Image: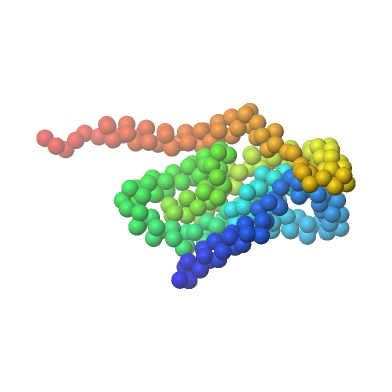
Amino acid sequence: MRRYAPLAAVVALIALAYAFGLHRDLSFETLIRHRAELERFIAGHGPAAVAAYVAIYIAAIGLSLPGGAILTLAGGFLFGPVLGSAAACVGAIAGATIIFLIARSAAGEALTRRAGPFAARLAEGFRADAFNYLLFLRLVPLFPFWLVNLAPALFGVRLSTYVAATAIGILPATVTFAVFGAGLGSVIAAQEAQYNACMDARRTDCSVEFDISSVLTPTLLGALVGFGVLALVPVFARRLWGRKLGAGVPSNKS
C-alpha cells in the first residue's frame, strides 16, 4: 500500500485538477487576461516570480495537464528567451522526473513481470538502448509527453539515463517555443485590445485566437524528426554490427 500511495495521490490530484477546470487555465487567453498583473508581479518579485513559474510548470507536467507549449511560450514572453527557456526546462525535467520516480517505485518492475515474456523482452530491448530511444521520443513532438514520462518507468530505465535523455531531448523545442514567445509582444497586445473591446461590449462570445501550429511549423517538425532519427542511428548500427558478428561466428554443429 505504501508503494502505491504516491501514485494514488497523483491520480486523485489529476482528477481534482480536471474537476476544477485547472487545465483550461493553461491557455493563451489566461496569459492575455492577466498579463498586466503578471508583469507587475515579475517586476516586483523577480526571483520569486521565476520560482512560481517553475512550480506551476512542475505541477502541470506532474499532473499531465495539457498546456506545456503555452507555458513555454509564456515563459519566453514574461522572462525573455534565455531565462524563459531555462525555467521551462527545469520545470519540465523536474515534473517528468517526479512522475517517473513515482511510477517506477509503484508499479514498474511488478507490472513488467506480470505482463508476460513479450513485455519482458521489450523492456530488455528498451533498456539496452534506453538513452537513444528516449532521446528520439523526446525530440519528436508527436508522442504525448505524459506517455514518454511513464513508459521508461515501466521498462526499468535508470534515473540518470532518463534525466539526461529528457534534458537533451526537450531542449530544441523548448528553446524554439521560448524564443517565439519572447517575440509575441505585438500579437499579445493586439489580442488583448480585441478581447477587452469584446468584454466592454458585454458580449458573451469573447475569446482569444492563437494557433499553436504557427510555432510548430512543418519546417520545425521536420528538423525535430530529423534529430530524432539521428538519435536512433547508433541503435541501428549496433544491431547491424551485432548481426554481422553473429553471422560470422562458425557453428559448432557437425
Residue at 67% from the left image edge and 56% from the top image edge? 22
Picture mark count: 0
Decide if residue 98 is on the left or right side of residue 52.
left
Work out which residue is located at the far left of the displayed protein and give it: 254
In the displayed structure, would residue 51 be above or below residue 85? below
The colour scheme used to paint the residues is rainbow
Q: Residue furthest bottom?
A: 2
Quadrant for residue 208, please give it.
top right
Work out whether residue 76 can be spotted.
Answer: no
Q: Position of residue 248 (x, y in %)?
A: 27, 31
Frontmost residue, 90 versus 148: 148
Percent from the top left, x then y, of residue 98? 57, 59
Left or right relative to 221: residue 182: right
Locate residue 118, reporting x and y percent. Answer: 33, 48
Q: Is residue 160 left or right of residue 82?
A: left
Quadrant position of the N terminus in the picture: bottom left
Placement of 74 over or under 108, stated as above or below: above
164 to 238, vertically: above or below: below
Residue 239, quarter of picture = top left
Name of the residue lying farthest toward the top: 219
Image location (x, y in percent) of residue 68: 65, 47
The quarter of the picture where the C terminus appears is: top left
At 56% across and 47% down in the image, what residue appears?
145
Judge whether residue 96 can be spotted in this image. Answer: yes
Closer to the camera in the image, 179 or 114 = 114
Residue at point 53%, 36% (across, down): 228
